[in-house]
Structure formats: structure tokens, C-alpha cells
Image (spheres, helix red, strand yellow):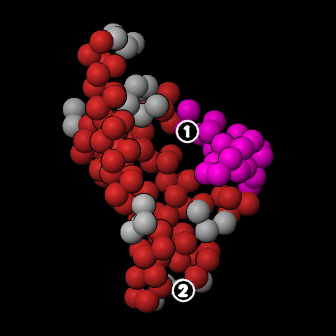
Amino acid sequence: TVGFLNSKGSFMAVAVYLLLGIAGMPVFSGFAGGIGHIFGPSGGFLLSFLLFPAIRALFSKKLTLAFGISLVCCYTCGCLWYMAVYLENFSTAAFVSSLAQCVLPFILPDILKMMCAINLIARVKNGVKMA
């Protein structure tokens, strides 16, 4: 949504997605839902999605940069949340552990998905006039 909608529309779409998940709809990873996902170890990653529309607005002409910064924001918020909720520790060892568990296994697939999304957005926007 961040690639096609304006900031307000993107924020609303992300908020609705999160609210559906909180209400129990199976929209989160693994077809899961429920408020426990927001307050669990992955809550920081999910809540960070609300920042993406603002980041996209700040870098409106540089889609790749906006997506890259959003990914870094997602990892940062997610790791900090994971350290607080799951590890209950903010030590260097906890930081390294959170990176090993929450970032390293996902960084390559996330970058590939990001690049595919950027390519798709560019192709669609070139072929379709968006309001």
C-alpha cells in the first residue's frame, strides 16, 4: 500500500491490517491473529509498519531509499521490542542474540521481496495512472 496510496491512505491501510490481526483475523505471519501477537516477541516488527507511510512521504521521490530505511526501522523496532519482551535484557549479548534471531535469517529474503515490490510498483505506476 505504501507504494500506491498517499500517506494517509497507507497509514489507514496498515492500521486496518493491524486492527484485523488484533481482532483475531488470521492476517499475521503463519495465518495467525490475536492481540498476543502485538504484545509478544514480534510486536515491535508489526507496530513498526505504522512508520512506513511517514518514511515513504519523506522520501517520496526515492522509493528504494524509503523502502530501505523502512526495513532498517522495522528491524530496529523489532529487535528492541524483542529484547524488552522476550529477552528482558538490553545487554550487548541480548542485542547480538536479537540480531541473530530476528534479522540475519530474514534479511536476504526481505531485501529480495523489497526489490520485487519496488519493481512491481514502478511497472504498475508506469502503466496505470494512480490518483
Quote the CA–CA distance across marks 2 and 1. 29 Å
Q: Residues within 10 Å of mark 1 (few under 14, many from 20)?
A: many
Q: Which residues are magenta?
A: 13-35
Q: Position of residue 11 (x, y in %)?
A: 51, 36
Q: Which mark is residue 14?
A: 1
Q: Earlier in the sequence, mark 2 or mark 1?
A: 1
- Position of residue 36 in the picture relative to residue 58 (left or right): right
Q: Position of residue 125 (x, y in %)?
A: 31, 19
Which quadrant of the view contains residue 23?
Answer: top right
Instruction: Look at the picture and state if 55 lies above or below 117.
Output: below
Residue at 49% in and 64% down? 78
Which quadrant of the view contains residue 39?
Answer: bottom right
Which structural element holds mark 1?
A: helix
Q: Which mark is residue 89?
A: 2
Instruction: Look at the picture and state if 13 lies above or below 34.
Output: above
Report if residue 89 is visible in the image. yes
